[in-house]
Image: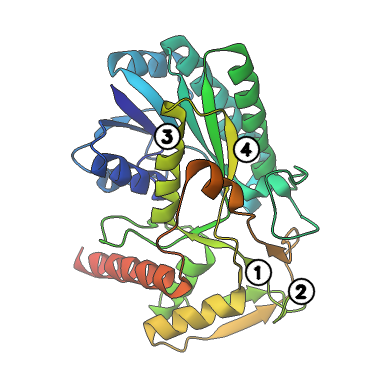
Amino acid sequence: MSILVTGGAGYIGSHMVLELLSAGEKVVVLDNLSTGVRAAVPAEAQLIVGDVGDQEAVTGLMRRHGVEAAIHFAGSIVVPDSVVDPLGYYNNNTVKSRALLAAAVAAGVKNFIFSSTAAVYGMPSTNPVSEMNELKPISPYGTSKLMTELMLADVARAHDFRYAALRYFNVAGADPMGRSGQSTPRATHLIKVACQTALGDHAQLSVYGTDYPTPDGTCVRDYIHVSDLARAHMAALRNLRNGGASDVFNCGYGRGYSVLEVIEAVKMVSGVDFKVSFGPRRAGDPAALVAGAGHIRKVLGWQPQLEDLATIVTHAYGWESRLVKLAKAS
């Protein structure tokens, strides 16, 4: 029996593969390598280059490899891009997820873990945000993820099939052992871009909005270490295997940091006082987005190990430094 990880050559997916292998699981990775990196997949996992939307091929893959659970990361994640190309996002994130679900049902895969997002909440009026908050996404990205959550619930009602949908807040950091990290060149994550700026990749770091109703006027977000997130998926997998009910879980720490606090943390870790510019707000940015994180701890017994901001930044900066060295050596 094996675990299928779609998008396992990507940022979060590659950390999930490391976690599964450490637990002694047999892992099959399905990735089309459009944004994923072949080198991010450990040799112990089997990489199959293919499209998650190819229902017939994925059904055959699941049967051949005896897949007993699927963990679905494959998809597009850049919110502004989804506004420009909504149909592309609905195809990649929703239509292809529908094909994957159909393949899972056909192959008898009973356990499914879905990479969802806090973007399903849109612009929440209160924080922390619980799983019971109104679901009102404001971007095609958020809507495409919510549509997949709805499909999961319907499939679970109709078939012998259970799922966990994990709604990520702001994922950051890198594997503490330096085996993987955020390698996507166009990634827009604040901590990654700030680390790149400290390393000289950007002339300055842009801050959008300083007049939000927050302590320092900049947006507040809940940053979760990618390795803690991978362990949350492992906890969800254990729960499903033990007969746990289908459910949704926020993945965050319940503690937010402002943009300026993150910048100061990167400056402290890097020792570089890089230039920061300030501009107007971007449309669609909530003032604050912090996870109500009690449900995942209560139901799954998940306990974060790397929730300190300085630790997250240290691991992210170490990974970015490694990428710079590799680029210079090539």
Which is nearer the N-term, disc 2 or disc 1? Answer: 2
Which is nearer the N-term, disc 3 or disc 1? Answer: 1
Disc 3/disc 1 C-alpha distance (Å): 30 Å
Disc 4/disc 3 C-alpha distance (Å): 20 Å
The residue under label 2 is: 212
The residue under label 1 is: 220
Q: Amino acid at mark 2?
A: Tyr
Estimate the x, y position of residue 195 in percent, counting from the top left.
43, 73
Which is nearer the N-term, disc 2 or disc 4? Answer: 4
Camera-nearest label, 4 or 3? 3
Horizontally, is 329 left or right of 146 in the view?
A: left
Horizontally, is 208 left or right of 21 in the view?
A: right
The residue under label 4 is: 145
Q: Amino acid at mark 3?
A: Leu
Estimate the x, y position of residue 221 in percent, counting from the top left.
62, 65
Foreground residue among 303 and 122: 303
The residue under label 3 is: 237
